[in-house]
């Protein structure tokens, strides 16, 4: 399983996951977790009269395109892949961990983010949460 969000590090994680899936003849499960309450509503969007629903709809379209691109990339590498847009009212970490458990995945490959505050200098909060709560091995790539 590889969770993606369009960031530089999720693309690196996707590349690593595709390589592993190819080497081990595994199917790749690509997910994007989208929570309505966690969407960043930019000041400019709100001041332009854009509703939260419109922002969510746009984010959902971006996520779907990102998943389609990821599956296409995997298939071009000869890897069988499926994707899912996860729309849950729980935390992103809980959504990823629950999906991994439900799908009985063998490994989660997740990207880290850039340096954050002092507590999370090495890996980001989502990565840390997935490592902490997943019931399967987790590979964090930089």
Image (cartoon, rainbow, N blue to C red):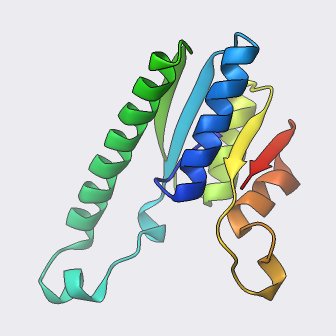
Which residue sits at x=42%, y=37%? 67
Identify which residue, 99 or 73, lies in the foreground: 73
x, y percent for residue 120: 79, 77
Choose top left, top right, bottom left or bottom right for residue 1: top right
Q: Residue furthest left?
A: 48
Whether residue 1 is visible to the viewer of this picture, yes or no, is no
Whether residue 85 is visible to the viewer of this picture, yes or no, is yes
Q: How many marks?
A: 0
Identify which residue, 74 or 125, lies in the foreground: 74
Q: Is residue 124 left or right of residue 131?
A: left
Q: Is residue 1 left or right of residue 10?
A: right
x, y percent for residue 115: 70, 77
Choose top left, top right, bottom left or bottom right for residue 107: top right
Which residue sits at x=75%, y=33%? 101
Identify which residue, 116 or 44, lies in the foreground: 116
x, y percent for residue 89: 52, 57
Compared with 57, 54 (above or below) is below
Compared with 65, 123 (above or below) is below
Q: Is residue 94 left or right of residue 80?
A: right
Which residue sits at x=26%, y=66%? 55
Q: Is residue 49 left or right of residue 134?
A: left
Which residue sits at x=74%, y=38%? 108
Compared with 60, 73 (above or below) is above
Choose top left, top right, bottom left or bottom right for residue 56: bottom left
The C terminus: image quadrant: bottom right
x, y percent for residue 60: 32, 51
């Amino acid at each position: 399983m590889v969770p993606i969000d369009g960031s530089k590090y999720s693309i690196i994680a996707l590349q690593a996951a595709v390589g592993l899936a190819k080497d081990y003849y595994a199917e790749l499960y690509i997910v994007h977790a989208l929570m309505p309450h966690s969407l960043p509503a930019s000041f400019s969007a709100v001041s332009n009269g854009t509703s939260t629903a419109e922002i969510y709809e746009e984010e959902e379209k971006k996520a779907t395109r990102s998943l389609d691109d990821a599956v296409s990339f995997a298939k071009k590498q000869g890897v069988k892949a499926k994707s899912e847009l996860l729309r849950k009212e729980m935390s992103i970490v809980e959504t990823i961990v629950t999906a991994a458990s439900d799908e009985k995945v063998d490994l989660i490959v997740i990207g880290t983010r850039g340096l954050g505050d002092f507590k999370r200098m090495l890996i980001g909060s989502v990565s840390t949460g997935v490592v902490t709560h997943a019931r399967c091995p987790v590979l964090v790539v930089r």
